[in-house]
Image: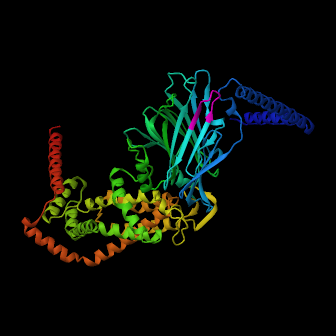
Amino acid sequence: MDKNTLVGFALIGAVIVGFGIYNRPSPEEMAREQHYRDSIQAVAQKQQQLQEAQEAAAEKTIQLDSTSAFFQATTGTEQFTTLQNELIQLTFTNKGGRVSKAMLKEYTDQQKQPLVLFDGEDATMNFGFDGKNENILTENMYFQPMNVTDSTVTMRLNAGNGGYLDFNYKLLPHSYMVDFSVQAVGMKNFFSSSTKTMNIDWSQRARQMEKGYTFEQRYTSLTYKPVDDSSDYLSETKDDKETIPEALDWIAFKNQYFSCVFIAEKTFEDATLESTMETQGSGYMKAYDAEMKTAFDPTGEKPSNFQFYFGPNHFKTLLASNDLIFKDKDPELEDLVYLGWPIIRWINRWFTINLFDWLSGWGLSMGIVILLMTIIVKILVLPTTWKSFISSAKMRALKPYVDKIAEKYPNQEDALKKQQETMALYSQYGVSPMGGCLPMLLQTPVFMALFFFVPNAIELRQQGFLWADDLSSYDDLISWSTHIPLLGNHLSLFCLLFSAATVIQQIIMMKQQDTGANPQMAAMKWMMYIMPIMFFFIFNEYASGLSYYYFISSLIGILTMWVMRKMTDEKKLLAQLEANKKEPSKQKQSGLMAKLEALQKEQERLQKERQERMKKK
């Protein structure tokens, strides 16, 4: 681009800018324009308000239609009825005839007040019934409380013809279970003979119950159980909506530690379930909605029976509640406590939970209980730890011989021969290079079991230990106001200690391994060092009880390695290996070693075939 072109573009730009400045409206003109826009907006808002008022008036006119069988139930005054036992207090409203508040007496919220699962408009339940000439939507109709006691209430919706619709509630003693039934009386003429179902729309905004929003969100989900199948759930991390083709036994609006479960005797059909994320800081986690159908007898001969569970996600409490549910069902409410994959879940159910309950029964603090559990688990896996350590020690003892083989075959093209002689060496001395892997692999399910158990153990909720005020959430002894990506606004000290201890443990373990000059092993070595750093950023938001468990586990692991190293004389171990070499009958070749030898022979055969083909070409 030459000089004249540049000057031309500059002049054009100057003209455009100057023209814009010259034609810019004056302050008075701008004020008039803004006033005009505000007037237009005000008119639009007024029209919208007028339209909404007209729609409300039309709806009211329909509601006040005196020909409606439930004309009298469309108006009234909201009244509240309370049922309670030693565990829970439920408040019922006559508007809609539903539970409007659920408060758990043995648990507190973050302000140390009795924990409220939902209240007011947080939750709604609307029943829809299709009649011959009109439909019933119970949400805005006023019921009449009947047969009120400390544990029972009947919400009655009266019809003009003397019939009525009853919602019967019964709070079971010493439990979080509520029996609930819907029954029509004297309403045969209202319904068509073809009516066999009713519609239910149940919704709730799940409150934030715990200290950490991000961590609680991972365990807050709309969960459901298909008939004769395991439970399933909608996404915990994004908006999700599903139409379920299978019949369902129950639907649960689940938080990390508490759930509201709706259970049907005759199953829920054609269910559409939706979970919507709430904004962090709003005080809510998710908005749940469930629309479904279920069996209904308009003659009133057979009531539609249901049950509610408003309570904690405590494994044994849920397990005991199963016995209170309809006898022909196996509801498996305990699935609301996620204990991991099948084998890990089995370990947690039959070992971890019982061990935890036994130690908790001593009246110890939860921090000491976790410490004792870690020690017991370490003792149980000690035989496999010792076997893995001895396998590594044997490899170290033979390292001088392995180094001689490496010197004998320095070239890359001799890698197969070097590998063959190395494996032959191990075979002569009765050593398996994989001997330390299997024992460590057997330990993994036990340690993973605690990874799934700790975040779901409601017993750790609001239990402090040392500087952590709540072992079920992160410990923020060090915090700041600015949000830092990947780190957040706090530093979990237990997480930092766990990561540091893991680095030290990895250094000790890698020193026991013979990495040699293998670049893959060297890369693996660096990976083992990087992983604890990654763990720090992952676990900084996790429960401090989990980080504390891994910290203690790493410390015990370091101490165990030090003691084993002191107990092992590698010179004597080498002498024993030399003795084994002289007496092959005493050696025990593992099945793995036999397979490795067979694999090497097959590789040698394939290599010879390739070399022969190359010679022919």
Q: Is residue 164 magenta?
A: yes
Q: Nearer the viewer, residue 243 or 69?
A: 69
Residue depicted at x 37% and y 62%: 354
Residue depicted at x 51% and y 24%: 195
**Compared with residue 10, is residue 554 higher up or lower down, i.e. above or below?**
below
Region of the chain picked out in magenta, as a range: 157-166
Please name the colour scheme applied to the rendered image. rainbow
Residue depicted at x 23% and y 77%: 569
* Residue 105: quarter of image: bottom right
* Residue 291: quarter of image: top right
Q: Is residue 141 magenta?
A: no
Could you tell me if residue 220 is visible in this image?
no
Q: Position of residue 155 (x, y in %)?
A: 60, 40
Q: Position of residue 489 (x, y in %)?
A: 60, 60
Would residue 323 appear left or right of 123 to someone viewing this image? left
Would residue 379 appear left or right of 492 to someone viewing this image? left
Task: Please state, as top left, top right, bottom left or bottom right, where the N terminus lies in the image.
Answer: top right
Q: Nearer the viewer, residue 166 or 414?
A: 166
